[in-house]
Image (cartoon, grey):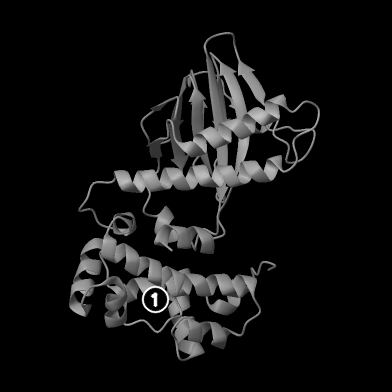
Amino acid sequence: MDALSEVLRVSHFQASVTLDATAHEPWCVSIPASQSIARAHLVLAGECHLEASGLPEATLRAGDFVFLPGGEAHLVGSALEREPVALSSLLRSPVPGELVPVKLGGRGASTRWIMLSFGCERHLAQSLLSALPRLVFVDMSGTAPIEWLTDALSLVLSSGDSAYLGSAATRERLAEVVFVEALARYVHSLPRGGRGWLAALNDRHVGRALALVHGQPSESWTVAKLGRQVGLSRSALAERFGDVMGEPIFAFLTRWRLQLAAEYLLTTTRPVQSIAKEAGYESAGAFSAAFRRAFGKPPSTWRRRRRPT
């Protein structure tokens, strides 16, 4: 498995279609900031504009997908200077989970616009999220996931009084596929020779090493052992990883193990000593000190936020 897939899997990535709107000029919608949910916009027909604080205005045309990984507040519309409609006023549905197509705006040219929402455990997806720009712009024109999602939404429009069975689950899975496809296209569009986690995904050897570290973090890795797995000598992998990632292999591995330990503390009742050992620490004291440096609080305090499994 590749590193991107591993991070999405471990961070409990989920997605959904939040809004399916046909908007006629002039129109403007205000999307509030969120610390837990990130928004993306996909234009199926027509065009609109998007503006977030500190970013230049972006124009979206049919096939364009824009993702704001930080969950910033922003505006979407044909006329952003217009008094915006609050997103919450468009999300009223008579049945929870049902997607009701929305119409808004005036009588001018129309835009078919879909908003998607994404959530994950952010501390587990930090490698990905911190590497992305504030605005991820991808041309998704003609891609299979967009056609699948459009077909699924068309079923909603034609299904009459009752939604087809499994419609909400289908939309969620397709929203996830669209997001993963957009991320993959964005990564592949990056120029060669860059540095950081995203650049590493495009590197044959470093990308494979990342996948192994993400997928088997408790393995007793050595640089030589990783090198054998990816087809490089110990010294060659250490040099290449440092050049691409900007840090040594074991600095990255240690951080990833601590991120997983933070998740285990929240979702399990395993003893701290057991979690510490899996994270590569022989003593709970050493683990606690490293955990405090990484998360600003000791494991016992972090665990009080425990979520149900």
Along the viewing direction, whichever of 20 and 29 lies nearer the viewer: 20
Compared with 72, 303 (above or below) is: below
- Residue 272 image position (x, y, % from top left): 57, 84
The answer to which quarter of the image holds residue 93 is top right
Disc 1 crowd rating (10 Å Cα; few below 14, some 14-19, many 20+) is: some
Near-viewer residue (116 or 37): 116
Q: Residue 231: percent from the left, percent from the top?
A: 25, 72
Q: Viewed as shown, does residue 233 lie left or right of 210?
A: left
Q: Residue 94 location in percent, x, y? A: 79, 33
Q: State the residue in front, 222 or 127.
A: 222
Residue beneath disc 1:
254
Instruction: Kindly tell me whether residue 70 is visible in this rendering.
Output: no
Q: Residue furthest bottom?
A: 282
Quadrant including the C terminus? bottom right
Which quadrant of the structure image shows residue 252? Answer: bottom left
Side (left or right) of 57 relative to 39: left
Residue type for callout 1: Thr
Residue at image coords 57%, 31%:
150
Q: Specify the quadrant that holds the N terminus.
A: bottom left
Instruction: Name the residue located 41 percent from the left edge and 56 percent from the top edge.
Output: 128
Question: Considering only vertical position in the picture, is 148 above or below 132?
Answer: above
Compared with 23, 121 (above or below) is below
